[in-house]
Image (cartoon, rainbow, N blue to C red):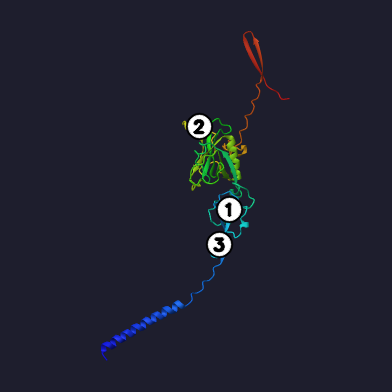
Amino acid sequence: MDRRFLLVLGVSLVFALLVSSIFYQMTMRASTPAPVMARVEEKDIVVAAKPLTVGATIKPGDVKIAKVTASQFPRGAFSTVEEVMDRPLTSNILLDEPIQEGRLAARGSGLGIAPIIPVGMRAVTVRVTEVVGVAGFVLPGMRVDILLTGKPPDSFDVVTTTVLQNITVLSAGQTYQPDAKGQAINASTVTLLVSPDQAETLTLASQEGRIQLVLRNGSDHNIEKTPGREVRELFGARRSSGSAPTAGGPPRDGTPQDGDADQSPFRVPRPRPTVLPATLEAAAPPPPVAPPPPDEIVSFRGTVRTVELITNRKN
């Protein structure tokens, strides 16, 4: 046979074997059944059926049941609607967001702003004007200082002093959440979150003088020591002695301060009694009494005056 013919025949056989092998492997792979996927366990989860606002109480139409895998079930979430029914919200919840324990208050803890108040704290509402309320820029969640202007006891000068610092605003008027557009809320009252001791100070301050809110940065938690200001200081005069409030003022930590006896928020210091040193020597004894003068007999003979002394005799 021709060598050329044999070479072509050999190459054709090799190519045919290669194609047959590839086709066989593809056929076997297609005929092999796919592995059965393991069944994923799912759990029921309670989610919000609509946007919910802080202070609202959950009703049947506010929530619904959704399905999630067991690995994606959040900690503190609920599986049944009955667990969250009639519980107030302590923060806003978005649509389809899971309801969690940390976002709810205890059942029966109150309505409106009451569930937001932490245990051990108090909410005090004070009346403000547009100017006193920082021109309407006080929003829930902001932090403010409280200034008091009035006349301290035993003083004839008007004084302004800081009585509370770093106080959280719970609500402005009837609104206890920030405006969605971030705009100011024009309100005639502001509710502040304070401790019981600070609630007493704030109530007394609102009765004793005029209070004003001062905005501060939300990340600034420093308590400044301020001496207060008198009217005479604005005109270059010196502070009157004994009428200046103590530096800083509240927030108070329960430690007695000067002026606590009269419950005055101006904290007027009282004069301290003078204590004599213990090393002072005793006063010198009084000098001895001088003896009485001796008796005299005066006689006149014409123009001559004669004086005779009589010596005192002991009995």
Q: Secondary structure at mark 2?
A: helix
Q: Secondary structure at mark 3?
A: strand
Residues at discs 2 and 1 in contact (Cβ within 8 Å): no
- Front one among 239 and 30: 30
Can you see residue 42?
yes
Residue drawn at (47%, 32%), measured in percent from left and top? 234
For the N terminus, the quadrant is bottom left
Instruction: Identify which amino acid the numbered label 2 is placed on.
Output: Val
Residue furthest right as drawn: 315
Residue drawn at (41%, 78%), measured in percent from left and top? 26
Number of callouts: 3
Spot occupied by residue 193 in the image (x, y as percentages of width and height): 57, 45
Q: CA distance from mark 3 to mark 2?
A: 68 Å
Question: Which comes before the other along the chain, label 2 or label 1?
Answer: 1
Spot occupied by residue 220 in the image (x, y as percentages of width and height): 49, 47
Q: Mark number for residue 231? A: 2
- Front one among 27 and 290: 27
For the C terminus, the quadrant is top right
Q: Is residue 210 above or below residue 218?
A: above
Question: Which comes before the other along the chain, label 1 or label 3?
Answer: 1
- Front one among 153 and 120: 120
- Residue for badge 3: 67
Q: CA distance from mark 2 to mark 1?
A: 57 Å
Within 10 Å of disc 2 (Cα), the crowding (few <14, some 14-19, many 20+) is few
- Residue for badge 1: 62
Instruction: Identify which amino acid the numbered label 1 is placed on.
Output: Asp
Can you see residue 275?
no
Q: Secondary structure at mark 1?
A: helix
